[in-house]
Amino acid sequence: MAVDAKSVKELRRISGAGMMDCKKALTDAEGNVDEALKLLREKGIKVASKRAHRQASDGLVYAYIHSPGKLGVLVEVNCETDFVARTDEFVEFCKLTAMQIAASDPLYVSREEVPQEVLADEKNILQKQLDGSGKPDNIVEKIVTGRLDKFYSEICLLDQEWIHDSSAGTVNDVLLALIARIGEKTVINRFARFSIGS
Amino acid sequence: MAVDAKSVKELRRISGAGMMDCKKALTDAEGNVDEALKLLREKGIKVASKRAHRQASDGLVYAYIHSPGKLGVLVEVNCETDFVARTDEFVEFCKLTAMQIAASDPLYVSREEVPQEVLADEKNILQKQLDGSGKPDNIVEKIVTGRLDKFYSEICLLDQEWIHDSSAGTVNDVLLALIARIGEKTVINRFARFSIGS
């Protein structure tokens, strides 16, 4: 059916959606503006969830070889679009992250990747170091938590201090700042670090 | 203790070792040339076994990024000395191998790395495909072996055809030819292959 131009205008004003989307929604809703708005919202939610699903499926694979070729890093950083992946800022982040991995030798990207056994072993060691210290349990717990944070900051890339600028905080802080600037979900997906003789 | 210059001279002549090593061995052997020679030999054996252990402990980490950065490969190729690792021929082999990995997407370097479960699964599938074919067991076995070779040539780098020159045979053939020319043990140790969206 043909839709009323006034309704389209109103729907556009309320929904902020484009002309074609509003026309289609009004057609589907048989001219009812409230129904059409609902349809647009549902579609919007679908778009958002589709977007959430698609999030960070583009990106860049970046390689850094530390001269003279005895140490190399390959890192995959994902973002949402090729457009962002090609920007100088994104490429620079990938490069600096690869150099960070080369210098700081993390074992995992994030805390979530640390295997349970590794974590349990570390907790055990920390606990044993504090056994018989005579400190109350709640203090021991705090100390263990603090030392675990330190442990994570050694083995997890995102928890490491950003080596290129100590005032920038952790790698994760720098990543969050990048996301805020470029406006796309960005994820350090994986890395490999090969060193001759290791 | 100070050591006798004549003993040092004699020890150098017998052992062929350097002045400082002979002096040290004589000191440790309290001036006894036979004992000192034994010490030098022991040390020599240690050096040799250390070398055997060190074999292919140098090499190169090489990166290949397939333009425009959606696919990347990092490969570690080991040889015995930095001297060889820096030669054009070695670097070229690393580069072509990295490109091979990018193009042919192997999962393992060699057959030995294929997990037993993966192999058992594949054998099962092949066996089932031939069940009820009416072929004698020895023929079935031959067919399975042939198909397993094909399977390996798809997933194992060393079994893959060298993509840069089909007359060169497999990657392993090209590696063996390289070893024959450069005269050093050479090993493709490991690789990583990252592809955006995989």
Image: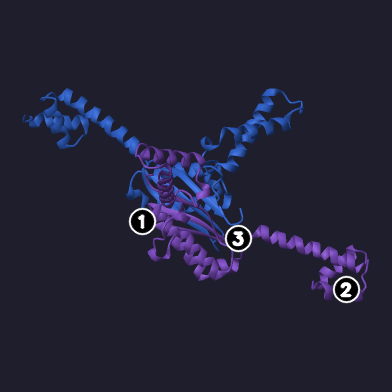
Chain colours: A blue, B purple
Chain under numbered label 1: B
Q: Residues within 10 Å of mark 1 (few under 14, many from 20)?
A: few
Point 90% across, 63% down: residue: B29
Residue on which the image places disc 1: B68
Disc 2 and disc 3: Cα gap in Å? 35 Å
Dot 2 lies on which element? helix
Residue B74 screen position, x and y as percent:
48, 55
Nearer the observer, B143 or B170 = B143
2 or 3: tag closer to the N-terminus:
2
The residue under label 3 is which amino acid type?
Ala
**Quadrant assignment for the N terminus of chain B:** bottom right
Residue B108 vertical position relative to residue B10 in the rendered view, above or below = above
Chain under numbered label 2: B
Q: Residues within 10 Å of mark 3 (few under 14, many from 20)?
A: many
Residue on which the image places disc 2: B8
The residue under label 2 is which amino acid type?
Val
